[in-house]
Amino acid sequence: MQQWIEIVGAEGVRAEDRVAVVAPSNDEQVAAVLQRCSQGLSVTATGGGTKLGWGNAVDANIRLNTSRLSGVREHSWQDLTATVGAGTTWAAMQSELAMHGQRVALDPLFAERATVGGVLSTNDCGLLRMRYGSLRDLVIGMTIVLADGTIARAGGKVVKNVAGYDLPKLITGSFGTLGIITEATFRLHPLQKNTSRFRVRSEDVVPLAELMHALVTSGMSLEAMQFRNEADAFALDVEFAAVPEALAEHQQRLRALAGSLPVQACDHDMYAVRESLFAIEGATVLKLTTLSTKLAALVAGFAQLAASGITASAVADPAGVVMVALIAPAAGLATIVEDLRARLLGIGGSVVVLQRGALPIEVDPWNDAVQLPPALDVMRAIKHEFDPTRLLNPGRFVGGL
Amino acid sequence: MAYIVMDATILAQLKSAVGEHGLVVDRNQVQTYECDGLTNFRTTPAAVVLPRTTAEVQAVVRICAEHAIPFVARGAGTGLSGGALPAEGCIVIGLARMNCVLSVDLENARITVEPGVTNTQVTERVKAAGYFYAPDPSSQTVCTIGGNIAENAGGAHCLKYGFTVTHVLGCEVVLPNGEVRWFGSEHGVVDPPGYDLPGVFIGSEGTLGIATKAVLRIVRRPETVQTLLAAFHTATDAAQTVSDIIAAGMLPAAIEMMDRLSITAAEAAVHARYPMCEALLLVELDGPRAEVDAQIREVRELCSMNNAWEQRLAQTEAERSLVWKGRKAAFAAMGRLASHYIVQDGVIPRTALPMVLAKMQTMSEETGLRIANVFHAGDGNLHPMVLYDASVPGEEDRALILSYDILRLCVDVGGSITGEHGVGREKQCVMSYMFHEPDLATMLRVRHAFDPQNLSNPEKVFPTPRLCGERRHGAYVPHPAEAAGIAEVF
Amino acid sequence: MAEMLVKIEPQASVSLPMPLLDKCVHCGFCLPACPTYVLWGDEMDSPRGRIWMMRKSTIGEAAADANLQKHIDNCLGCMSCMTACPSGVEYNKLIEETRAQIEESTSRPLPERLFRWMLFATFPHPQRLKLLGVPIALYQRSGLQALARRIGLLKLLPKRLQAMEALMPTVPLNPFRTLMKVSSVKTTRARVGMLTGCVQDAYFGHVNAATMRVLAAVGYEVVVPKSQGCCGALMVHSGLEHEAKAYAKRMIAKFEEAGVDTVVINAAGCGSTMKEYGYLLRDDAAWAARAAAFSARCKDVSEVLAELPIEAALAPLPLRVAYHDACHLSHAQRIHAEPRALLAQIPSLDVAEMAEASLCCGSAGVYNLLHPETAEELGDRKVQHLLDTHAQALVSANPGCLLQLQASLRRNGHAELPTFHMVELLDASLRGLSVESLLKRHNQGCRRDR
């Protein structure tokens, strides 16, 4: 413990489950901690700890906590950019940016607790992706500390920049295996002033799936949309964001496109649905990716599981991601996951376990035994260059990266 | 004059890889590949191969890997940073013959193409179905998807729609060791587990391998498009208008600015009937009709508030395309005003625009070299064009120095040395002004992971002692591999 | 890697004016416009690459060798690159100058020389073409052509002769009929002189006749100077500058004698050449001014007709046609809108645009005879785009294109698709002909082809 206190001070060190939790307060301290680890201590970076269960479990020697690397460090509101410490919670960042009517146009899970660094590392995107792109399209700069203590700045502070390799994209979604993110710069979007939300329900999946496709290709100002199953029907939540004149027209067009399906005002928080899946007692939560044309069929398939006594709550976003919470006996869960993986393999889809629930421990969160990434050798070579002695989150990511 | 001739056994191997008609070695012929859109730097390659399939590309790269011969991939050779400039004794791999659209999946808004397909051909292919391919570099009628991927090409409309990297869901890549791998998703599915290899590969300027197929996202054509031309007496007024538009919460499809010199050149080339003024703004809004109508009214008010003396809305599709044709021809049209010019590609925070423009004016007066300006004002991407006459001794060098000074100015105000043209050969020595040694060393780790032999487009992007002399920032820290003698500094 | 350094000794070279070369900024906008680049995807067969080779030779860094000659020869001279060029490169001047210098400084193999000699001994001579027409007409009408094509006899011929055979139009039985002077019933407009051309005169007499009727119908007085000879286009495009100049002088003199305000031309290739006489004879003190004045009076028939609204009644022609831009009209003369505007005046006529509209069909003067494989590829491509439009007929404004496209249609099994010169449709509409009677002539020719 003493060696960590020397670097970050006593207030930055504590023990948790017999593991040292070290919280540096600047880049140099992060570098010093990592250099000290080079004797062979493995490190997991943690922020709010909301997604530590994602991927393979890692029994790291120390936890590098980013909570002291927090705060919005620069908000160039006229240039629509902001630089934020990695330990800042997503919600804290957004409320500060909102003072100038701006935001990072992304709605990750657990925003109250999840930190910028954690959201970036897990590439957690929400519904806004359809309109604003995913995290990789919004992060324009980053500071990372490599395993050997190198402090590297990548990208820049302007929205358009192709100087050198785009390391921020490489690091985004790398599950803390390539370096520790200490700071990130985002491009911002204005907060929407005028929005309207609707929910369309249908017992039959087909008309609702057709409506979803019609909306995607309608050219209307869609802010977000999700397709999900309810107890005895399917529902499509739609949010428009536009000038008031357009909103009025969009509502009419939505009703016209929906035909006989009932269009109601959306009386629930559509952005909270994904998060609620994780709160279901004992639920196994999966993230599935597929082509957008296959989304509705997947959700319908989950709805049919009810007949076999399995509860499945699925939410699909038109970009091609389905999140599903399953309550079922362990054996049944394993079969479902296996079956889904087999079906999605042929079209390049994937099934990743985010929350294990009752799913047997033998079921790999990434499916490494059956399907490895096609360029895993390249990924391994990158890992080797960045972290040759495998100190950073060893084995957490797909393919044992 | 001397040039390098390749060993006969290697030539024989190359010939069996790509066939007699795919191999070019005659001096007169290979010389046509000695530069791309940037002619200030030229190197004659040892050979040019023109493969037709991934397997042929792979065979050539394997030969290169085996004999440690550098290779440089090339699309249409329209790049403005010398990205496709051959390396000494290298093989140029021209991909223009791989120009098939392989499949179109309108339901999922995906299209799979070979790298030699031009940017415009992608849009042409899906236009009738109501889609378009969003990245639109000015050379879009010519430049290829392969080149767009190498450079992470942008264009006027990336303000709203994003860059090439946003629109490539996967690509097949021939790695520098000759292996073929898919980066991202072959099927166009999002979020494949693993590192974001397309994210780092796209924009790597051909230094990490060669894309031989790409799955692209296509975008639904907006319901309506409105294009407004507004003429201003000063660049400051125009720049303020841009800031006001953004501050009002609007995200136009494009906001472009042109100065008097650029307008003159573009007019001469395509007769777009631009108003002749000090600063011309071209604002394009697209989306649902009701929204665009409301926003264009707001934009017009903001233009008036900032003293626009003429505002003109393109009335027809023909007028609109003429307005854009003029804008997109502006670089090349500069050939009508000056015998030579260098196009630069700096990026600045939008708010620094008036200050940077004033400084450039001073620099122009000090050096006696004219600077024309065309830029993507919405995202602060400047394209200053330094005009010069190569027949005047020393003028080319002075023009190059001035263009680098402009880039340093961009870095000084918190910007970047390149927004879409890439670093290439041209800007590699300014890289160390923007990045510190550890930043560059970290990028080189990626390079080393992909290409330990340093064969794929060597001597590009990163500063080298040979080409750039002493580095500016801090002490030079060798990469471990380099220190161990595995890799040479490049 | 074993390397060796090779010293290049300067050999024969071409020398072009640097200001013309410097206009090219190497942007590459010409690449997709160039037919050979579109086909082959190599830099040497693009305008940018050719200009680079010219530059290299001019500054002494490369020889004007057989490879340079090959790529210069490969150029169709369609001038599509000039339309695409934002910086205003005068490629026509560069390529013609290079060709002239190459012809002077290098020699071609004997068979090549003979073939070229044969072309230049026939095509620029309307009378010789007409003489040839008699045996050709007999060959076509006797069933011999059909037989030869059916049994594959022609495959025994060298490719270039095969190409000649394939390109032969259905020759009128009496190619020697001469045009009468046609005057308008009510002359309300200027007096114009008409160029009869070589191929046009010999094989497309009906187009000349239609042109005269249309001009007269809208109010022009039309005269046709006798013994006009050839405009020299083939010579200019092949680097035979001396011959070209001689033809030009004769042409200028003939039309000066006729005393016309305007010279009307219905063959795009001729028009673009005659509009450049001023440049061709710029260094000839005695002729420079006369040539410039003459060039200024030359106009394509579509320019003349589009100048004023057609007042005569135009009958409906319910037909879907695809309009093919002749390169020497759209690129060399920048005449793009006029023929479309004229066709748009014909009631019920539906005009479709083809994909790759600016790409050459492969005709390009005698290019389809000198480079038959390339020309066939381009022709096939055009036919595919034509079929994609679902048009019932093809319309163009140049005899060379029409011959090339007819041959391409035959080769692709679509001999039934008729081709017309733009003025033929105007003529039919002005005369109130029905679609059926318009198609009749084509069908007669078509039956003989089977």
Image (cartoon, grey):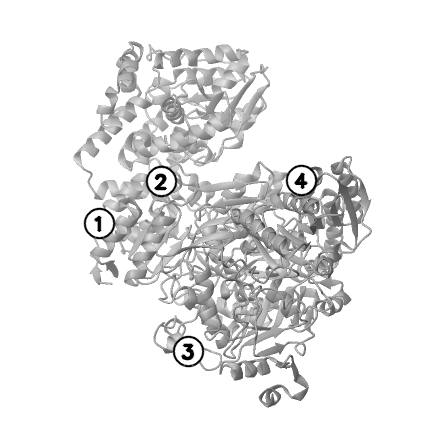
Q: Which mark is residue B315?
A: 4
- For this rendering, which residue is in front, A350 or A369? A369
Report the Cα–Cα distance between label 2 and label 3. 65 Å
Mark 2 lies on residue:
C282
Mark 2 is surrounded, within 10 Å at the Cα level, by few (under 14), some (14 to 19) or many (20 or more) other residues, namely some
Q: Is residue B12 above or below residue C178?
A: below
Report the Cα–Cα distance between label 3 and label 1. 51 Å
Q: Which picture quadrant has residue B67?
A: bottom left
Q: Which mark is residue C12?
A: 1
The reply to whether callout 3 and callout 1 are in contact (CB within 8 Å) is no
Residue A77 percent location from the top left of the image: 70, 66
Single out the mark in the foreground, 1 or 2. 1
Residue C313 percent location from the top left of the image: 59, 15
| Residues tagged by mark 1 and mark 2 found on one chain of the structure | yes
Q: Callout 3: helix, strand or loop?
A: loop
Q: Does residue C39 show up?
A: yes
Report the Cα–Cα distance between label 3 and label 4. 59 Å
Q: Which mark is residue B478?
A: 3
Of the two numbered discs 1 and 2 on the same chain, state the one appearing first in sequence.
1
Q: Callout 2: helix, strand or loop?
A: loop
The residue type indicated by label 4 comes to Gln
The residue type indicated by label 3 comes to Pro
Q: Residue at x 29, y 61 (%)?
A: B66
The residue type indicated by label 1 comes to Ala
The reply to whether callout 4 and callout 2 are in contact (CB within 8 Å) is no
Single out the mark in the foreground, 3 or 1. 3
Q: Does residue B255 show up?
A: no
